[in-house]
Image: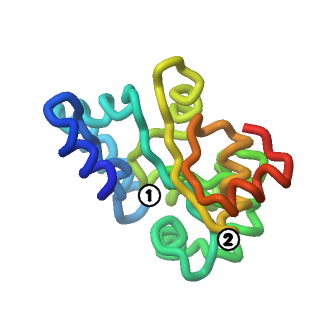
Amino acid sequence: NTLVGMMAAKYRPYVTAYALPVQLSGPLREIERERRRLLRNPEIRRIYEGAQAVDIALVGIGMIGEETPGFCSLAESYGVSVKKLRRLGVVGEINYQPIDREGTVVTRKELRALNRRVLSVGADRLQALSRTYGKYVIAVAGGKQKLEAIRGALRGRFMNVLVTDENTALALIDSGVKP
């Protein structure tokens, strides 16, 4: 978010920055109601639709781990432990969407409340953007602890640019992952 804010400030008035994802709270029924209410609001709807059609999307790739803030903390708050995420085949997340080692979004019943709680640019939209000429989905992630998550995100083709460190890039090349 800080990087996006800095970029938006630098290139103003030629850009618009959108801060997604938005996290909703409460039981699944209330989350669904809140999603619908938010998306009926013309201003929020404009922002949400604008974020679906950006020229540049900047996303993170998260790992699955006990000490991981963000996605894993959110999952824990819905009763889905890191161990359970791993049992479900989740190796990481991109834009708060759990992925497996093959780059497929994990949509198991146990994750429904978690998946619906986040209002964001969906994985299918990231894939479509990354395959569109002149559009960039830039993923930022590094460190050996994130290798499995980065590999999954590359296999899923959620991005067309990866910003990482040298050691991670070499490990990805050595493991034969092809973008």
Judge from the rendering whether residue 21 lies leftward or rightward of residue 116; answer left or right.
left
Residue 41: assigned label: none
Q: Quadrant of the C terminus?
A: top right
Q: Quadrant of the N terminus?
A: bottom left
**Can you name the residue that lies furthest to the top here?**
133
Residue type of the residue flagged with mark 1: Leu
Judge from the rendering whether residue 23 lies leftward or rightward of residue 101; answer left or right.
left
Residue type of the residue flagged with mark 2: Gln
Say which of 102 and 38 sits in front: 102
The residue indicated by pointer 1 is 28
Color theme of the render: rainbow
Q: Is label 2 in a helix, a strand or a loop?
A: helix
Residue 101 vertical placement versus 157 (above, below): below
Along the polypeptide, which appears first: circle 1 or circle 2? 1
Residue 145: assigned label: 2
x and y percent of residue 163 in the render? Answer: 55, 50
At a point 56% along the width and 39% down the height, the residue shown is 161
x and y percent of residue 106 in the render? Answer: 67, 51
Tell me, yes or no, if residue 91 can be seen here: no
Closer to the observer: label 1 or label 2?
2
